[in-house]
Image: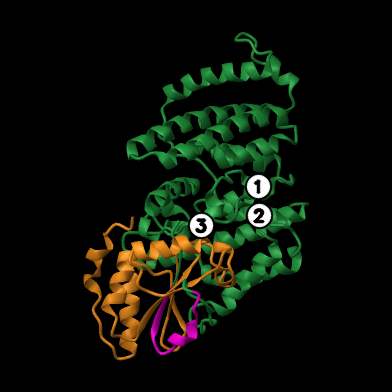
Amino acid sequence: MQMKWLAIFTALLMVACNNTATESGNTTGGDSNTQQKTAPDDDADNHDHDDDDDDGDEHSDDDDHDADEKKDEKKDDNSFEGEKVGAKSDTDDDEPETKLTVSEQFKEIKSEYDVAYKEYRSEARKAKTTAARSALSKKFTAVVNSAGERAMVLAEENLQDESAAEVLIWASRNVTDAEMRKKAMELALDHFMDSPKMSDVCMTLSRGAPSADNEATLKKLRDESPHDEVQAAATYGLANFYKGIKRSQDYAKTTDRYTAPAFVADYDIESVDMEEIYQSLVDNFGDIKAPRGTYGEIGEKALFEIRFLSIGKVAPDIEGKDFDGESFKLSDYRGKVVVIDFWGDW
Amino acid sequence: MYPHERSLVKKLADKPFALIGVNSDKDLDKIKEIVQEKNITWRSFWNGPEGTSGPISTKWNVTGWPTIYVLDAEGKIRFKNVRGDSMDRALEELLAEMGVEVDLSDHAEEDDDSDA
């Protein structure tokens, strides 16, 4: 049960990391034995990006859909939208858009996606065979495609409207088609660097396949955004970006089957002062609310890990109780080689 | 994971080695059942009813599961997140430092056992 569930989530996570786990800084490689799972609560139903944490739940699915399917779905969508808007006719496509604000139109697209996502998640969990899961995924992909296309049209027609930022950012994180995600991201960066919504972009940039562009954009947002929240998210994003590179480099060292992409392999990660980045989260953005807790808390925890849980440090003692309520300590095992395994059966 | 770990624990039973879990399942009764069902023979700290937000994993800044630390006899952290073969090699190396030679290379076959 654990493995089945993990497989589904891992598949989603891998795709969220720009479709190739091996290129991603967030997963340590394509080997399922090395994939970590996040806390069960994170995975439950918070695909909405506002709640994402750093191991997150951004959703998209694989790209192997075909054009015919897209077209078919598009037709259905037009009728769907027509019903909702109440003024749409086949011959007069532009009219309804003038009646609803960009935000309102986006809300409809998003809610259609959300419903389909929820349904997909619940059915995929019940599905017993790979074929059944694949069929569900295909069905969901079709909905995502049409929602994505409409979101892009909406955003591109309204680039002067601040609300389009939200639409593009949503598309850059949720749409299935990698090209479309890329285009959405580019448009968002071209037109809305100053938007407070750019916090969400930082997470995407830090999780995808690491690139010089992503790093430069995160630095730009950290240094130039007028919003503290965005600066904080970009600082944290940079930390995760570097952490991902380090993890991939380490993984490549120990695993013959995995070769890090050139950008990752060549990156001089030892020259990055992670303590300084996390200290800046504590000092400059301590009170700002992060996806979980505050950036101050995130910084403090990461600093603790660097200072006391790095290779070569004596591990802090653990005092606790076993499943039968009996107390014991990690230091009871001094004198032995010890494997500490943080595990969970979910 | 379980079969590999079970096999390690068995193989290194008379060696200066311990596998210690820190379990982050919220439901104590349920995890006790799983321990029986899956023959988890090693001892674990229970991270408490808050599960993944419990005190031990929070202090150790664990955000992904499993997370692995390997300590030498002095309690020093020597490896992180080694799994399967690389865990075996790490253990061989650390035990060798203590003058204990072990060969864990035939583990691999047992790793393929299904967890579920």
Instruction: Estimate how packed mark 1 is, as few (under 14), some (14 to 19) or many (20 or more) residues with alpha carbons within 10 Å.
Output: few
Q: Earlier in the sequence, mark 2 or mark 1?
A: 1
Residue farthest along the right direction in this orientation: A226
User: What segment is highlighted magenta in the picture?
Assistant: A325-340
Q: Is residue A273 visible?
A: no
**In which image quadrant can residue B81 be found?**
bottom left
Question: Dot 2: what SS?
Answer: loop
Residue in front for this viewpoint, A66 or B106: B106
- What is the distance, in whole Å, between disc 2 and disc 3 at their CAs? 14 Å
Query: On residue A38, which mark appears?
Result: 3
Q: Secondary structure at mark 3?
A: loop
Q: Which residue is mark 1?
A: A50
Q: Nearer the viewer, residue A251 or A327?
A: A327
Marks 2 and 1 share the same chain:
yes
What is the C-alpha distance between the residues marked 2 and 1?
A: 7 Å
Q: Disc 3 marks which amino acid?
A: Thr
